[in-house]
Every structure is written in C-alpha cells, then in structure tokens.
Image (cartoon, rainbow, N blue to C red):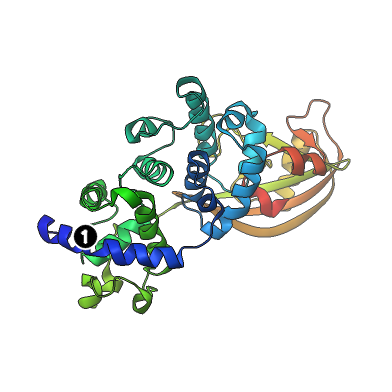
Amino acid sequence: MQTNSTTMILKEIVTPLLRWYHSHARILPWRENPNPYFVWISEIMLQQTRVEAVKPYFDRFISALPTVESLAEVPENELLKLWEGLGYYNRARNLQKSAQEIVINHDGKLPANYKKLLSLPGIGPYTAGAIASIAYQIPVPAVDGNVLRVITRLLASRDDIMKEKTRKKIESYLAQVIPANEAGNFNQSLMELGATVCLPKGAAKCYSCPLKQICLSFAEDCISEIPVKTPKKTKRIESYTMLRLQYENKIALQKRPSTGLLASLWELPHLDNHMGQAQIIHYLQEKNYKVKNITPLPPSKHIFTHIEWHMIGYYIELEQIPAKSNYHWISPQNLIDDYAIPTAFKGYL
C-alpha cells in the first residue's frame, strides 16, 4: 500500500460512507443512547459475538447494573450470572476491575482520553478507539475485524490482517481521514459496512455497497481473495465424560480452579477421556456413592479459542452419598437463579 494514493482513496470514502450509514444503520440499544458506559459494555460484549445475540444480554446487564458504580460494587457471582452465556468470563471480571478503577480514579466516569481508556483492564486499542470516538467524538480510529476487511478490500491489500503491523498501518491511514465532527459515526459506518455488506468468505454484497466505485478489489475482481489471513492453528482436542449426578432432587456442582480456562466458575463433575457405564459406576463406588440408575446422554462438542472439547455424559441418580461429599449439591431453581454455568456444560443440564 502506497501512503499517498491510500490517503486519497480513503478520503474519497468519507462522504458516501457517512451518507449510507445515516440511512442504513441498524437500530441498536447502545446506539440509541451512546453514553460512555453503554458503549463500553456493548463493545466488550460484541467481541467475538454477533450483534443479534448480544441484544438481550446487553438489556439484561444494563437493567441490573445501570451505572459504573453498580458494576464496581456487584458481587462477583452475580456479575458472572449476568454474563452467563456470553463466554470469555475474564472479560466480565476485567469490566469490574476497570469499573472499580474508574470509581476511584476518575470520579465514576470513563475518561474522555484515548490513552487513559487504553490503560484500563480489558480495554485494547479497538475498544478504546470505539469509546473515545462514539461516546466523546474524539477523532481516533477503531479498527476491528470488520474494519480490517473493509479497508484491505478497498485498497486491494494483501497484507496479513492477523499481524499487528497491519492493524497499526490501517489505524495510521484512518487517523488521517477520520472527520473530526463525525468521528463516532465514521467508525461505526466502517463497522456497519463490514457487518452487513462487505461480508467475509465470498459472501460480500458488492452491488449494494456505497463504495463499489472506489473499491480496488471490486475493480480487480479479487474480493474473494482478500483479506489475507494466517491460517489458524489446529485446535487441541480434549475428551471428557460429564457426570450429571442427582441426589434427592439436588444436582452436583464443583468449582473450577482459580486459574486457567473458565477460572473459578461452576461446572459439572467430569472425568478425563470417554468412559463406559461400568467404569463410571466403579469410580463412584470407590468414593462411596451408591448408584440407583445411570443413563447415557448424547455426545456434545464445545469449541474454545484454542481447544475443542469432545464430551459424552451420563445422568446418574444416586441412592446414597458420603457424609463428606466433595461436591456442592444445588437445587435446580438455585442453579438457574444463582450459579453461572459455562455454556460448555449446558447440554448436560
């Protein structure tokens, strides 16, 4: 990409893109009231999650925790329950750490300063740029995956969008053309175009695009070849046997370790590898659990960023448990109301 010609191309997109955005932008709850807190919560929720999926979670979260102060003070188990279903629970924990820091150091208000936003836990360059531009109209770029795809296609760039230097290069280009009076709308228009028109994997709706006359990839008929991405590493596969243990209408849960994947969250008891019924009964008997009935449950699969869980499971009714059980026994209603259970285990509840 040549800097001078790049700047000229990107200057050309500003007016048609904003005109398109003002007539095509989706109505979203955080856009209707773009206060800094709402923008922040929505941007964290939207990481690796579709907009339509986020809407009910956002409404539920904001209803329960409408201010930075309420987020700072909520007990962690309640916070994680509100986050349940979104995954990546450390994002929720970082939200609370940031909220506590904002209350102590920033008078309960997200700072109207890109560098100060960037210093808060869980806020990276994209999120800081989104909050700064959308909530405060500070003319800084907000470059996410949608924006990377739109810009590399516009410029017919073969730069690898998985590399940090590519993101920084595109940030520097956009910083030169972002309109000071519509910084938030400009950033959102690029995101919106990537989310609804300039779609990935050959699904781009080029003939509906307001920038098709400017787009070099459209002119060169190479949309399907861009963006260029380093292939993802093969995920590690782990096998587990899930135990849905029930005793006197209570379900067994245990807490995960305080570090690592799904840290400190509640889960179903489980064993490494896939095991048969006889092995499970023997395992429980050794721990002084008396099995009444055991029923196989369907296999399930859950995909994390770098790991794939392949699971089988059993529904097990117990006649007797040891006086000192290692599990927490929870009523179904308490489980629904009070315990954040990762999605990976939901198929066995």
Tell me where residue 185 appears, x and y as whole percent.
38, 54
What residue appears at the point 21 percent right and 60 percent down from the top-left corner?
11
At x 51%, y 37%, the residue is: 90
* Horizontal side, residue 168 vs residue 55: left or right: left
In percent of width and height, residue 126 lies at 36, 45
Outermost residue on the front side: it is 181
- Kindly identify the amino acid type of the residue bearing the numbered disc 1: Lys
Q: On the picture, is 181 further left or further right than 8?
A: right
Closer-to-camera residue (300/55): 55
> Do we see residue 213 in this rendering?
yes
- Residue 231 visible? The answer is no
From the viewer's side, name the closer residue of 23 and 230: 23
Is disc 1 placed on a helix, strand or loop?
Answer: helix
Q: Is residue 157 above or below residue 54?
A: below
Query: Badge 1: few (under 14), some or many (20 or more) residues near its Cα, within 10 Å?
Result: some
Q: Nearer the viewer, residue 299 or 11?
A: 11
Q: Is residue 335 above or below residue 6?
A: above
Q: Is residue 278 above or below residue 334?
A: below
Q: Quadrant of residue 118?
A: top left
Q: Which residue is mark 1?
A: 11
Residue sitting farthest toward the top: 104
Counting from the top left corner in percent of width and height, residue 79 is at 63, 35
Q: How many marks?
A: 1
Q: Is residue 120 left or right of residue 49?
A: left
Q: Residue at x 26, y 66 (%)?
A: 153
Quarter of the image for the N terminus: give it: bottom left
Q: Position of residue 221 (x, y in %)?
A: 24, 78
